[in-house]
Image (cartoon, helix red, strand yellow):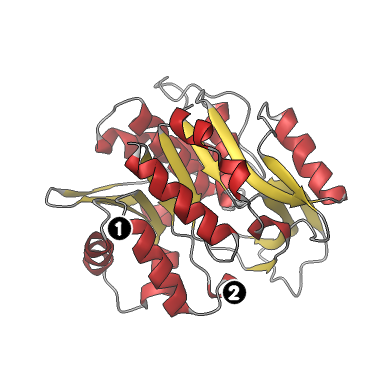
């Protein structure tokens, strides 16, 4: 297995009207969502072997997600239906900028120990999760325990620090959890907007890198929206790569997940970090031109895909 994705499987209801707020959006379209689940779907579509461990409610929306995963060619063997907990969902505005969103949490936080067994961990090259997945118990303790085990066994950890105040009790708790995960030296992806929410508007790019390096993460990737991405490898060079030009972004929801899918593809295929960024930018460019998931199978190694 190339990537074991853990947590954050939910339903995205994306606004049909462009540029509206949550309050003024009248209709929504339904998609499989959640940063970690999006990455699993993307990674599968670019040819990586992926498994997903997550939880849904024992309800119609949970069935929808299971059916979607099956349609995308992913196993549902490690997806658990949680009785008396609704399937989690998020309402998201359709926008060219960072979208407004309202989360409605339920089953996604109820991951149990048997879902992430030792056999799964032993097979994986990369163990990936998100700040969202770590934001509530009991999932947090289970994911941290399994991530620690994975790290000991030589599996490379990964995290999307998709911090938002709406999903945490308080910021101090979030930073403590992020510090603990980063102490295991994962590959870190954080967007400029998430970093501002977490560290404040006064934090410069170098401050963000320094903080996350101090937590224990050597490789930190900062995504900058239309400005591309920066990467800092502790003790080595920091570099920036520009985004691929696009005439019009159809929808930005999931673009960061697409980027990190491409980055991990490069990492797993043993490319250098600058090439990993290039793969990420290619896949983000494709995603920005589609609402919902990226198109069917994409050969990222093909230079003619853009």
Q: Residues within 10 Å of mark 2 (few under 14, many from 20)?
A: few
Left or right: 68 as drawn, with respect to 54: right
Q: Secondary structure at mark 1?
A: loop
| Location of residue 282 (image quadrant) | top left
Label of residue 136 in the image? none
Q: CA distance from mark 1 to mark 2?
A: 25 Å
**Looking at the picture, does residue 259 appear above or below residue 166?**
above
Q: Is residue 7 visible?
A: yes
Disc 1 crowd, CA 10 A, few/some/many (<14, 14-19, 20+): some
> From the viewer's perspective, is 270 left or right of 22?
left
- Residue at the disc numbered 1: 183
Q: Label 2, on which residue? A: 166
172, 142: nearer the viewer: 142
Task: Return the x and y of residue 158 as percentages of the image width and height.
Answer: 40, 46
Element at badge 2? helix
For marks 1 and 2, the one nearer the N-term is 2
Is residue 132 in view?
no
101 relative to 304 in the view: left or right? right
């Amino acid at each position: 297995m190339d990537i074991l994705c853990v947590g954050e499987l939910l339903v995205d209801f994306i606004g049909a009207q462009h540029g509206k707020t949550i309050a003024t959006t009248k209709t929504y379209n339904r998609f499989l969502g959640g940063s970690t689940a999006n990455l699993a779907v993307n990674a599968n579509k670019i040819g990586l072997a992926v498994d997903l461990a997550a939880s849904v409610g024992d309800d119609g929306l949970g069935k929808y997600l299971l059916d979607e995963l099956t349609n995308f060619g992913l196993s549902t063997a490690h997806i658990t239906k949680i009785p008396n907990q609704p399937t989690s969902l998020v309402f998201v505005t359709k926008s060219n900028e960072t979208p407004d969103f309202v989360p409605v949490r339920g089953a996604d936080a109820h991951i149990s120990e048997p879902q992430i067994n030792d056999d799964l961990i032993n097979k994986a090259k990369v163990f990936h999760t998100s700040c969202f997945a770590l934001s509530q118990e009991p999932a947090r303790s289970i994911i941290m325990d399994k991530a620690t085990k994975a790290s000991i066994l030589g599996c490379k950890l990964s995290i999307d620090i998709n911090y938002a105040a709406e999903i945490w009790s308080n910021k101090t708790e979030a930073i403590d959890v992020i510090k603990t995960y980063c102490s295991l030296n994962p590959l870190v992806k954080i967007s400029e907007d998430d970093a501002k929410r977490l560290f404040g508007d006064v934090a410069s790019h170098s401050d963000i890198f320094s903080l996350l390096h101090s937590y224990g993460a050597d490789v930190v990737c900062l995504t900058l929206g239309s400005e591309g991405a920066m990467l800092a490898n502790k003790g080595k060079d920091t570099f920036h790569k520009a985004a691929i030009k696009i005439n019009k972004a159809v929808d930005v929801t999931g673009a960061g997940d697409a980027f990190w899918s491409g980055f991990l593809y490069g990492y797993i295929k043993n490319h250098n970090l600058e090439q990993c960024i290039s793969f990420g930018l290619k896949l983000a460019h494709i995603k920005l031109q589609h609402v919902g998931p990226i198109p069917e199978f994409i050969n990222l190694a093909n230079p003619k895909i853009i």
